[in-house]
Image (cartoon, grey):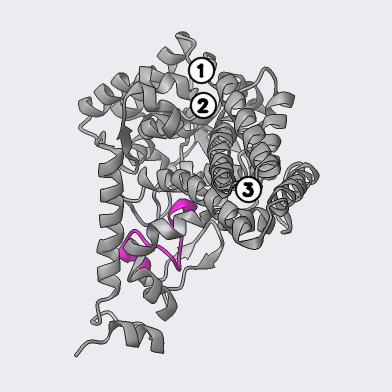
C-alpha cells in the first residue's frame, strides 16, 4: 500500500520564514503559525527568528507538555522529508523526559516565599529609614536596601516570566506586575519581549538584544561593520561617537552599570507607548504609574537635594550589581553573526553561556544565573532545581565534546573586562578609520 503522507523538503520549508508566512517543523510535522504569531505569549520574535526550520528542541525547552494539545489546529498536513535528530538532540530530549518524570519542573521550593519576605522587609526598612530618621547614613543605607529590593524583585520577575511561580496564572500575573512594574518601574511585557528574543538567539550579534548596547559597549569587533539589529529593526551604526565611547568601554563598564536602570525605564516606556501589540497594555502602564508615584514621593521626603541624589545613586548603584551579573554570563562567551539555527540549538546555548562557580549558600545572591547553561537549556525549570541537574548537563556536554564553561565571580568579571578591553583597543586602531569628530581626534592622536 502506497504511503499517503505528504512531504516537503528542507528547502521548501525555508521559504516560509516571513511575516504572514511562518511555518515551523516540530518532530517532523509542519505547522503554519502565521496567524498565531501575533498572539504568541512569547511574542513574534521567537517565531520570526526560527521560522522555516525544525524547532523541536526550542519548543520542548519553552513549552510544557500541555501545549501539545493546541498544535493540531496549526498542522498543515505536511511532514518534513528526511527528518532526523542528532545524537545531542536525542540525549537532550531524554534529559527533558527524565526531569519531567522526576517532577522537577513542578518542584519550585520555598524560594518565592523567602524572596517576598525580604522584599517586604527591605521596603519597610527603606521607607522607615527615610521618613523616621534624620541621619544621612541611615538615608544612604535606605537607598542601598531599596537597591537590594530591586534585585530580589528582579529575580522574581525573571522567574515568573519563565514558569508559573504561583498557584495559578492570575496570581502569577499579579506577581509579575507587582515585582516588575509597580516595585521596580520595569515593564514585564518589555522584559518578556526582550528576554525571549535573547534566549532564542543566544549571543547572535544581530538578533540577541542583550549584546546590542551601542554606542556604549561592543563585545566583538564585528560590530565595527555597523550590523543591523533585527530585534530593534535598525542599523547599529559604528560612527565616530560610538568609537569614542567604545574605546574606553573597559573603564566605563562599571560606572555605566550603576546607571543602567535608566535604560530599562526608557525601554519600558518606549514599548508601551509604541504601536507594537502589547498584551494587557493598560495593566502595564498602570503598574509603571504606581512606581512613578511612590518612588519620587519617597525621595521627596528627604530633607535636601544632595541627600536625594545620594539616595537615588545608592539605590541605582546597588542594583547595578544585578546588571553586571547579566553581562557576566554572556559578554565573554562565543558570539556569532546571523540567524539563530534550531539545528544546533543545544550547541549554541552551551557555547554562548558561562556559569558562575559559587557555594550553595550563595545561590540567593546570583538568583539562578550561576547555572546559566542549565537555565538556557531548561528555562522552565525552577531555579531551586538547577544545582541538582548540573551534573547531568555537565556529563552530556562532556559526552558530545561541547563546552561547559565555568568561572568564579571574580574570574567572570576579569573575563568580561578583558573582552571589552580587546574590543576597545581594536576600536582605537587608526588603520581602521571611521569619520572622526574633534573629541575623538583630541583623545586619540599622539605625537
Residue 394 at what x, y percent from top left?
A: 27, 25
What's drawn in magenta, residue-wise? 207-223
Label 3 neighbour load within 10 Å: few <14, some 14-19, many 20+? some
Q: In which quarter of the image is residue 256?
A: bottom left
Q: In which quarter of the image is residue 446?
A: bottom left
* Disc on res. 190: 3
Residue occupying image coordinates x 24% and y 36%? 403
Is residue 209 left or right of 343 when viewed as pictured?
right
**What is the distance, in whole Å, between disc 3 and disc 2 at their CAs?**
19 Å
Asked which secondary structure carries label 1, the reply is: loop
Asked which secondary structure carries label 2, the reply is: loop
Sequence-first tag of 3 and 2: 3
Closest to the camera, between mark 3 and mark 2, is: 3
In the foreground, 8 or 432 = 432
Instruction: Examine the structure image and report whether residue 37 is included in the region drawn in magenta.
Output: no
Label 2 neighbour load within 10 Å: few <14, some 14-19, many 20+? many
Name the residue that disc number 2 marks: 380
In the foreground, 45 or 113 = 113
Q: Are marks 2 and 1 in contact (CB under 8 Å)?
A: yes
Name the residue that disc number 1 marks: 105
Amino acid at each position: 500500500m502506497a504511503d499517503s503522507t505528504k512531504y516537503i523538503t528542507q528547502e521548501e520549508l525555508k521559504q516560509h520564514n516571513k511575516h504572514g508566512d511562518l511555518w515551523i517543523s516540530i518532530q517532523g510535522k509542519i505547522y503554519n503559525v502565521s496567524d498565531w504569531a501575533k498572539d504568541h505569549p512569547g511574542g513574534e520574535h521567537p517565531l520570526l527568528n526560527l521560522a522555516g526550520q525544525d524547532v523541536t528542541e526550542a519548543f520542548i525547552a519553552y513549552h510544557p507538555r500541555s501545549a501539545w494539545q493546541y498544535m493540531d489546529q496549526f498542522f498543515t498536513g505536511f511532514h518534513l522529508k528526511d527528518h532526523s535528530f542528532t545524537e545531542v538532540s536525542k540525549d537532550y530530549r531524554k534529559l527533558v523526559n527524565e526531569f519531567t518524570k522526576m517532577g522537577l519542573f513542578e518542584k519550585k521550593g520555598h524560594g518565592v516565599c523567602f524572596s517576598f519576605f525580604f522584599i517586604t522587609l527591605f521596603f519597610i526598612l527603606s521607607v522607615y529609614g527615610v521618613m523616621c530618621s534624620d541621619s544621612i547614613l541611615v538615608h544612604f543605607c535606605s537607598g542601598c536596601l531599596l537597591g537590594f529590593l530591586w534585585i530580589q524583585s528582579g529575580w522574581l520577575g525573571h522567574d515568573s516570566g519563565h514558569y508559573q511561580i504561583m498557584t495559578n496564572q492570575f496570581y502569577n500575573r499579579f506577581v509579575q506586575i507587582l515585582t516588575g512594574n509597580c516595585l521596580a518601574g520595569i515593564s514585564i511585557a518589555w522584559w518578556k519581549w526582550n528576554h525571549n528574543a535573547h534566549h532564542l538567539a543566544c549571543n547572535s550579534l544581530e538578533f540577541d538584544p542583550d549584546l546590542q548596547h551601542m554606542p556604549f559597549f561592543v563585545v566583538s569587533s564585528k560590530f565595527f561593520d555597523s550590523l543591523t539589529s533585527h530585534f530593534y529593526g535598525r542599523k547599529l551604526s559604528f560612527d565616530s561617537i560610538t568609537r569614542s565611547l567604545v574605546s574606553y568601554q573597559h573603564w566605563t563598564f562599571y560606572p555605566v552599570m550603576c546607571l543602567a536602570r535608566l535604560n530599562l525605564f526608557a525601554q519600558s516606556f518606549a514599548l508601551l507607548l509604541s504601536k507594537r501589540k502589547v498584551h494587557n497594555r493598560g495593566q502595564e502602564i498602570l503598574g509603571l504609574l504606581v512606581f512613578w508615584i511612590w518612588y519620587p514621593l519617597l525621595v521627596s521626603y528627604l530633607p535636601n537635594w544632595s541627600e536625594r541624589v545620594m539616595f537615588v545613586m545608592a539605590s541605582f548603584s546597588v542594583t547595578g550589581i544585578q546588571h553586571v551579573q547579566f553581562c557576566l554570563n554572556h559578554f565573554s562567551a562565543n558570539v556569532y553573526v546571523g540567524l539563530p539555527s534550531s539545528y544546533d540549538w543545544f550547541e549554541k546555548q552551551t557555547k554562548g553561556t558561562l556559569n558562575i562557580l559559587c557555594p550553595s549558600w550563595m545561590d540567593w545572591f546570583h538568583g539562578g544565573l550561576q547555572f546559566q547553561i542549565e537555565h538556557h537549556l531548561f528555562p522552565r525549570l525552577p531555579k531551586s532545581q538547577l544545582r541538582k541537574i548540573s551534573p547531568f548537563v555537565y556529563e552530556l556536554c562532556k559526552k558530545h565534546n561541547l563546552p561547559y564553561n565555568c568561572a568564579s565571580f571574580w574570574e567572570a568579571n576579569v573575563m568580561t573586562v578583558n573582552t571589552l578591553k580587546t574590543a576597545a583597543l581594536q576600536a582605537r586602531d587608526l588603520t581602521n578609520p571611521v569619520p572622526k569628530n574633534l573629541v575623538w581626534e583630541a583623545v586619540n592622536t599622539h605625537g
